[in-house]
């Protein structure tokens, strides 16, 4: 039997690019993309991608060249997920919230040959390009607004012109190794400097298949692009929507008005987002909010969704599936697969189960929680904490041009996530913290996620982030940063009230010794709270800091209710500049 050779008919490299010609053939007349007043069908999308790939080749783009793009969720960015690999190149989507310096660093590090820039980001891109040496300058192509062109340019080339000039009879680049790179994604840098994560055709194909299955996405979904496509290639749904012959609803901004309007107008069935977007949907005013005629499936992840928030968003008509992942795992690696027997449980209990990060996606080989010193698995008791480790084809190939960091990320055939978690007796994993976020107080480990979950239960807390604050006696102690929901006029929330709420519901050592009420928390483009900024801030607080915070009659009705004196003044000023 094993002497049967591989042949051309069965030895075909796995690649998500194959979903596009299939969609063009099976769903050719179905709407592929909607953006404002612009609509495409799958036949057109395929043809436009072939044309763009052809034009890229005529710009001397060859196998493994990097093509970077700085754009929000627009049709061009969707098309580039197919067109760039169809030219044999590697797509690098850049986070639009980065500053010019970071963008320049990515362009330089990736060695981008072509840089596509959405018209709205031309000033930012120009600043970034100015920081590059002339020998590392990519060819720049502006993407003008396809719905209402602006005429804004940066250099000679424009996206629609490239599409127009390309030949639709172009024969796409033939992949001969499924391990070839398809995209290069820089981590969002929540815990360290951004690193370039290389995805393979095989890994992205398998990840896409897992998510379609585990999110139970049937054919012809209407998918709202509320998750940035630049984040892990939209958790692979850039390719996944083509695989299901679905419709991509593109929006530039994830504001409540645009999301609700798109949901109602286009009858959206699915969307992905970080839990932080739940707040945007929940806090929408009555004029922004729309009645949902049928439930919308949401896949959430990227940060822990507190159980209380899950309960609230589901009451609005959204059905939430919770996933956990990271850039290095091609997006989601665990999904909290729902079990029918949980349907009978009270809502609160269901939300608690759903807040757990879940079980491995189907195409991963294995997931475990281990003691990294001994590499022994922790017992499945829901209590013993270890590091979450993963193995399988959708784990990144490695960090681009960084063998040292790549070697550090793997141990004994496992990828180390840097996240601390437990395994429950039913096999479901739950994150306790990122290893860097654990607070060690008097020798006790405190999970910042647990303290945050409680804070989210307070009726006035909108967002919460808990970090370690130096303490002369305990070493570290929790410090909470919170933002508040819009309350009644003149209604004031005091730090003491939040602390006493925690005291009633948490063991003493877990109670934050300090609660800072601020207008906004620093976040990454994907809505992740940047704890390292808060940690730096908390470091500047002395234990006696509460003594120098005074409330005055003048500020008692303001949203930030404290008059803050040195050194807090400095710290909060720094915060407002983040
Ligand atoms: P960065 O590491 O720079 O933040 P990522 O976007 O890859 O970039 O973030 C991955 C991290 O986000 C994970 O390691 C984990 O700490 C956190 N995360 C992702 N999904 C979840 C989730 N469902 N629950 C808790 N934390 C999550």
Image (cartoon, rainbow, N blue to C red):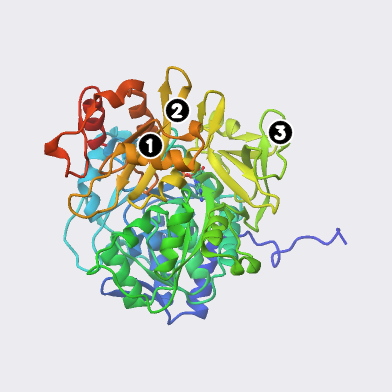
Query: Which residue is painted at 22% across and 54% down in the image?
Result: 120
Disc 2 to disc 3, C-alpha distance: 29 Å
Q: Position of residue 48 (x, y in %)?
A: 38, 69
Relative vertical location of residue 410 with respect to residue 392 in this rendering, above or below: above
Look at mark 2 in the image and give the residue it sits on: 477
Q: Position of residue 404 (x, y in %)?
A: 55, 28
Disc 1 to disc 2, C-alpha distance: 10 Å
From the image, state whether disc 2 or disc 3 is nearer to you.
Answer: 2
- Residue 501 lies left or right of residue 290; in this view the side is right
Classify residue 2 by image quadrant: bottom right
Report the number of numbered marks: 3
Relative vertical location of residue 531 with respect to residue 229 in this rendering, above or below: above
- Residue 203 lies left or right of residue 87; in this view the side is right
Q: Secondary structure at mark 3?
A: loop
Q: Position of residue 126 (x, y in %)?
A: 22, 43
Query: Which residue is painted at 55% across and 41% down in the image?
Result: 432
Kindly check if marks 1 and 2 are in contact, taking CB atoms under 8 A apart as contact.
no
Q: Secondary structure at mark 2?
A: strand
Would you say the beta carbon of the disc 3 residue lies within 8 angstroms of ligand 1?
no
Look at mark 3 in the image and give the residue it sits on: 375
Q: Which one is nearer the viewer's eye here, 549 or 527?
A: 549
Relative vertical location of residue 255 with respect to residue 517 in this rendering, above or below: below
Is disc 2 surrounded by few (<14), some (14 to 19) or many (20+) residues within 10 Å? many
Q: Position of residue 497 (x, y in %)?
A: 33, 41
């Amino acid at each position: 039997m094993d002497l049967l050779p591989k042949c051309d008919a069965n030895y075909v490299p796995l690649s998500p690019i194959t979903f596009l010609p299939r969609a063009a053939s099976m769903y050719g007349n179905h709407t592929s993309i909607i953006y404002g007043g612009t609509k495409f069908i799958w036949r057109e999308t395929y043809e436009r991608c072939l044309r763009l790939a052809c034009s890229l080749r005529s710009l001397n783009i060859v196998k493994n060249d990097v093509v970077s793009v700085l754009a929000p969720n627009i049709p061009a960015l969707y098309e580039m997920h197919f067109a760039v690999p169809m030219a044999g190149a590697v797509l690098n989507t850049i986070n639009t919230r980065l500053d010019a310096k970071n963008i320049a660093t990515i362009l330089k590090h990736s060695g981008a040959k072509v840089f596509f820039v959405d018209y709205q980001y031309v000033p930012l891109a120009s600043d970034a390009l100015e920081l590059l040496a002339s020998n590392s300058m990519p060819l720049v192509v502006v993407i003008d607004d396809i719905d209402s062109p602006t005429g804004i340019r940066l250099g000679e080339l424009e996206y629609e012109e490239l599409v127009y000039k390309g030949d639709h009879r172009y024969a796409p680049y033939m992949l001969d190794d499924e391990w070839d790179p398809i995209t290069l994604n820089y981590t969002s840098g929540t815990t360290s400097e951004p690193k370039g994560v290389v995805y393979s055709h095989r890994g992205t194909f398998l990840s896409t298949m897992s998510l379609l299955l585990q999110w139970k996405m049937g054919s012809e979904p209407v998918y709202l692009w509320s998750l940035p496509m630049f984040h892990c290639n939209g958790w692979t749904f850039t390719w996944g929507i083509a695989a299901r012959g679905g419709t991509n609803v593109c929006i530039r901004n994830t504001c409540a008005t645009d999301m609700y309007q798109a949901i109602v107008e286009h009858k959206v069935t699915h969307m992905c987002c970080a839990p932080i977007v739940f707040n945007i949907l929940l806090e929408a005013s009555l004029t922004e909010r729309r009645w949902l005629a049928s439930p919308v499936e949401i896949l959430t992840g990227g940060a822990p969704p507190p159980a209380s928030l899950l309960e609230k968003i589901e009451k609005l008509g959204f059905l939430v599936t919770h996933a956990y992942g990271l850039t290095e795992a091609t997006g989601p690696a665990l999904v909290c697969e729902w079990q029918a027997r949980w349907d009978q449980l009270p809502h609160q209990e269901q939300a608690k189960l759903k807040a757990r990060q879940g079980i491995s996606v189907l195409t991963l080989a294995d997931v475990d929680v281990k003691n990294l010193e001994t590499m022994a698995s922790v017992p499945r008791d829901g209590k013993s904490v270890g590091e979450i480790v993963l193995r399988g084809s959708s784990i990144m190939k490695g960090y681009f041009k960084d063998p040292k960091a790549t070697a550090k990320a793997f141990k004994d055939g496992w990828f180390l996530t840097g996240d601390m978690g437990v395994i429950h007796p039913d096999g479901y994993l739950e994150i306790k913290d990122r290893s860097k976020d654990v607070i060690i107080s008097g020798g006790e480990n405190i999970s910042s996620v647990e303290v945050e979950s409680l804070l989210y239960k307070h009726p006035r807390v909108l967002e919460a982030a808990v970090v370690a604050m130096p303490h002369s006696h305990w070493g570290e102690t929790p410090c909470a940063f919170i933002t508040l929901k819009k309350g009644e006029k003149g209604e004031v929330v005091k730090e003491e009230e939040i602390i006493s709420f925690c005291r009633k519901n948490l063991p003493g050592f877990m109670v934050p010794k300090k609660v800072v009420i601020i207008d906004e928390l620093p976040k990454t483009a994907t809505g992740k709270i940047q704890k390292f900024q808060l940690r730096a801030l908390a470091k500047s607080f002395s234990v006696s800091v509460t003594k120098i915070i005074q409330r005055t009659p003048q500020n008692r009705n303001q949203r930030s209710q404290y008059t803050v004196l040195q050194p807090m003044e400095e710290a909060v000023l720094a915060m407002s500049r983040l």
